[in-house]
Amino acid sequence: MLILASVHSPIAVWNIPAEYIRRFRRDFPSHTFLHATNEAETRQLLREADVMFSSEIDREQLAIASRLKWIHSPAAGVGGMLFPEMVASPVIITNSRGVSADTMAEHTLAVILGLYRNLPLAVARQREHLWAQDEISARGNRTIAGTHVLVVGLGAIGSAIAQRMAALGARVTGIRRRAGGPANGVAEVATTDRLLDLLPDADIVVVSAPHTGETLGLIGKAELDAMKRDAVLVNVSRGRLVDEAALAAALQNERLAGAALDVFEQEPLPDDSPLWDLPNVLITPHTSGFRPDHWDVMTDLFVENLRRYDAGKELLNVVDKRAGY
């Protein structure tokens, strides 16, 4: 069986190190592993691939991949792969959902505390050698305890975030696509159709839903207008779930107290984006999901699934291509 590893990007951290390709070859000597390090190599090698280890594939690539039966993504989000031709195809997609839940939950906690404790302002004044005690005190430090946190998306990541917020004394409401019983740390579970009703009471809104056709633009002008003026928005999901222009306008007009953004409509974030210079925005460059053993755990999951695939067993983390996750 020919397996193509195609995980490449201009951003170095997204490229699978060659040592893990060597691991695949060592662990599965009966299979042939090819490593594409750029787009041209991917298109050339994909024609003969039976399996693909990749977080991206487009229509043209799928059209030439006549032997492709299974794609395993080292990312959790696979929304960009789910174009109509892929959804209609027999190709199985598995992903890495849940693997980064804890590190993303800790990141979410960190940026909320950063905004609540005025750390961006403190760092700015530190660089200026200014003692900003009066300035920070005038703004006031805030505590998570006693807040109402609305977690939009109660998968592995949202659930891990909810548990941490509840542990610090917040009341957590979770939103998910389907109704169901309560989750750990969540006082109430609601469906997506109640989003507008719940936003006005939320102090912190965390977007952790998957990128699907239904969640595209989930937080737009109407939703931002419905939020409290002192509310904080955190997005650790995908940039396209939030209307970036509407969010920038709300923050510029101090319609919201602040935002912590790890994902954006276009990445890297363009130089001319107004978000860069807003004092009430904390930007991180899509790093919330990275952990010290990132490629170890991502390849561990693929190795386990490849063993299952060879044995004809059920795969882990099979994506419902029509639902989008």
Image: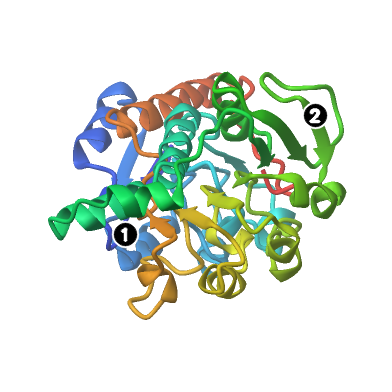
Residue 315 image position (x, y, % from top left): 60, 26
Mark number for residue 197?
none
Q: Residue furthest bottom?
A: 272
The residue that mark 1 highlights is: 9
Note whether 254 is above or below 144 in the view shown.
below
* Helix, strand or loop under label 2: strand
Q: Is residue 120 visible?
A: no
Note whether 113 is above or below 80 in the view shown.
above
What amino acid does circle 2 point to? Glu
Q: How is the image coloured?
A: rainbow
Residue 7 image position (x, y, % from top left): 35, 50
The first of marks 1 and 2 along the sequence is 1
* Helix, strand or loop under label 1: loop
The residue that mark 2 highlights is: 188
Disc 1 crowd rating (10 Å Cα; few below 14, some 14-19, many 20+) is: few
Query: On the picture, is 293 further left or further right than 324?
Result: left
Note whether 148 is above or below 245 in the view shown.
above
Q: Is residue 131 visible?
A: yes
Disc 2 crowd rating (10 Å Cα; few below 14, some 14-19, many 20+) is: some
Q: What's the residue at 50%, 26% (across, down)? A: 305
Quarter of the picture containing the N terminus is top left
Q: Residue furthest left?
A: 129
What amino acid does circle 1 point to? Ser
Residue 186 image position (x, y, % from top left): 71, 25
Residue 103 image position (x, y, % from top left): 42, 31
Quarter of the picture containing the C terminus is top right
Q: Can you tell which of label 1 and label 2 is closer to the viewer?
A: 2
Q: Nearer the viewer, residue 255 or 295?
A: 255
Q: What's the residue at 83%, 22% (across, down)? A: 181
Q: What's the residue at 41%, 76% (across, down)? A: 273
Q: Quadrant of residue 204?
A: top right
